[in-house]
Amino acid sequence: MSEPVAKRQMFEYDGDNPFHIYNIPHYPLSSDELLFNHWHEELEIVYTLQGNSLHYIDGTCIKSQPGRLIVVNSESSHNIIPDRTVYGSGRKVVIALLISREFLEGVFPDFKNMYFLNEKEMTTPEIGDLMVTLSHYDDEAETSYYERIYIKGLVLQLLYHITQEGVAEKNVILPLNNQKNIERLKGVLQFIENHYMEKLSQAEIADKFYFSKEYFARFFKKHTGMTFIEYLTKYRLQKARMQLMASNSGILEIALNNGFSDDRRLILAFKEEYGTTPFQYRKMERNKEE
């Protein structure tokens, strides 16, 4: 298993502002990219205003609903299957806060051993109000030095309240065997990212990462919400869509570059996922740009 581990997200921070605040759908990643497992050192706190997306975190599926807070722990492998019915309304769907690990280690001396729980389906009014207030200072807003002091105060209050909602010792919630399996999953996902343009089979991947075929199928679905084939196809489609928009390459060339055996298979999969053919999609998107 020589593949580098996992799809790691990296974030940069200003010296006196160790946070990122996003009002989704104005998120820096497209909803397609959120489908795929990723991890980061930051603590991610997500407050739902609309919709019922599915969050897969360390092998647990959590269904969001309006008023629910979901905490993604530092270094947790996670992906989201978004509720597409609520996107495009022009209103905020979700408020997401990312807090740098350096800041958290200054607040919690034992942060590396902490694991925030997601046991409550509805959060407290205090937490909801704090998240809504923080949303007014998202990454697109201009903030003064004194406002950044205020934001830090809000975040510290938020951290206090979420510790009251539930926090445990990481090794108790995620025993060593579970953590090793999550690392193996990260290796599988990195392998897909590096080799999606090649012919891949579930049996080959299971064997490469020392899973039985039957266990791997269950394990992969539990951690991603998709079968291996569904995940691989969606990943290839995302890459094909990006090439479609960034080049004038023909559909057959794009299909072959992204792991499809011919243009027909790409067209059928693309239409099922996006509701239109690749050619029509390219034309529609370029007309929007003009």
Image (cartoon, rainbow, N blue to C red):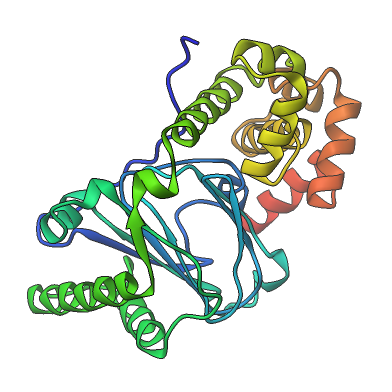
Return the x and y of residue 46 as percentages of the image width and height.
45, 67
Count every numbered label the image shows and give the total. 0
147 displayed left or right of 226: left
Give the residue at x 26% y 70%: 159
Q: Is residue 190 above or below residue 95?
A: above
237 displayed left or right of 243: right
Return the x and y of residue 70 as percentages of the image width and height.
47, 66
Q: Quadrant of residue 39?
A: top left
The quarter of the rendered structure image containing the C terminus is bottom right
Q: Quadrant of residue 8?
A: top left
Return the x and y of residue 287 as percentages of the image width and height.
69, 54
Give the residue at x 27% y 47%: 113
66 displayed left or right of 226: left
Q: Nearer the viewer, residue 284 or 49?
A: 49
Q: Is residue 290 visible?
A: no
103 displayed left or right of 123: left
Residue situated furthest front in the rendering: 172
Q: Is residue 123 above or below residue 282?
A: below
Give the residue at x 51% y 74%: 120
Q: Is residue 111 above or below residue 252?
A: below
Return the x and y of residue 239 as percentages of the image width and height.
64, 33
